[in-house]
Image (cartoon, rainbow, N blue to C red):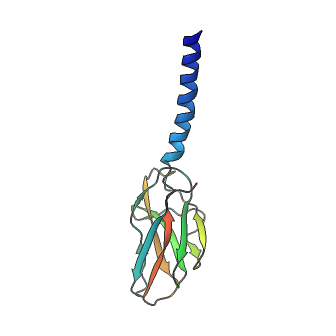
């Protein structure tokens, strides 16, 4: 009887621990970005980060200029539901995307300022959300 109880407790602990490990694997930690934009009409990109699940990406945009934001992987726009998101200064936003669903395992954000003047875009972002 003690052996059966021990096996049952072991299975229960592995089930609970396994669920915890899955939640720890999500890459939702914020990374700071500070991107200089020279005003040429182009765009700037954050560094690439691992994408570990099908959740939305997240941005909290700061600075003095709003931006159009795309979620990209391997140069492909994988923003879902729109060509891009308009993100105002001081706005936090979830960015629906199809990165993980299309088989990619990393992404970055491409930001295009709404003005064509030199500026620095900054804030935090994460490829996965809680």
Residue 35 x, y percent position in the rendering: 41, 77
**In the rendered picture of this protein, how many numbered marks are placed on residues?**
0
Q: Residue furthest front?
A: 2
Quarter of the image for residue 61 reads bottom right
Residue 97 x, y percent position in the rendering: 54, 60
Q: Residue furthest bottom?
A: 117
Residue 111 x, y percent position in the rendering: 47, 75
Q: Quadrant location of the N terminus?
A: top right
* Left-right relation of 57 to 45: right
Residue 29 x, y percent position in the rendering: 49, 58
At a point 53% along the width and 23% down the height, the residue shown is 10
* Residue 79 versus residue 27 in the image, above or below: below
Residue 32 or residue 117, whichever sits in front: 32
* Residue 60 versus residue 57 in the image, above or below: below
Residue 101 or residue 52, whichever sits in front: 52
* Residue 41 versus residue 31 in the image, above or below: below
At a point 46% along the width and 54% down the height, the residue shown is 51
At a point 54% along the width and 68% down the height, the residue shown is 59
* Left-right relation of 125 to 36: right
């Amino acid at each position: 009887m003690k052996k059966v109880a021990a096996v049952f407790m072991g299975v229960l602990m592995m089930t609970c621990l396994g669920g915890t490990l899955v939640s720890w694997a999500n890459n939702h930690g914020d990374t700071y970005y500070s991107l200089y934009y020279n005003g040429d009409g182009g765009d700037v990109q954050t560094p690439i980060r691992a994408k570990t699940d099908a959740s939305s990406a997240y941005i909290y945009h700061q600075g003095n200029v709003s931006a159009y934001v795309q979620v990209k992987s391997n140069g492909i726009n994988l923003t879902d539901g729109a060509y891009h998101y308009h993100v105002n200064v001081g706005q936090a936003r979830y960015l629906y995307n199809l990165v993980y669903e299309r088989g990619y395992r990393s992404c970055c954000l491409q930001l295009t300022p709404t003005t064509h003047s030199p500026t620095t875009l900054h804030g935090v972002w994460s490829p996965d959300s809680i």
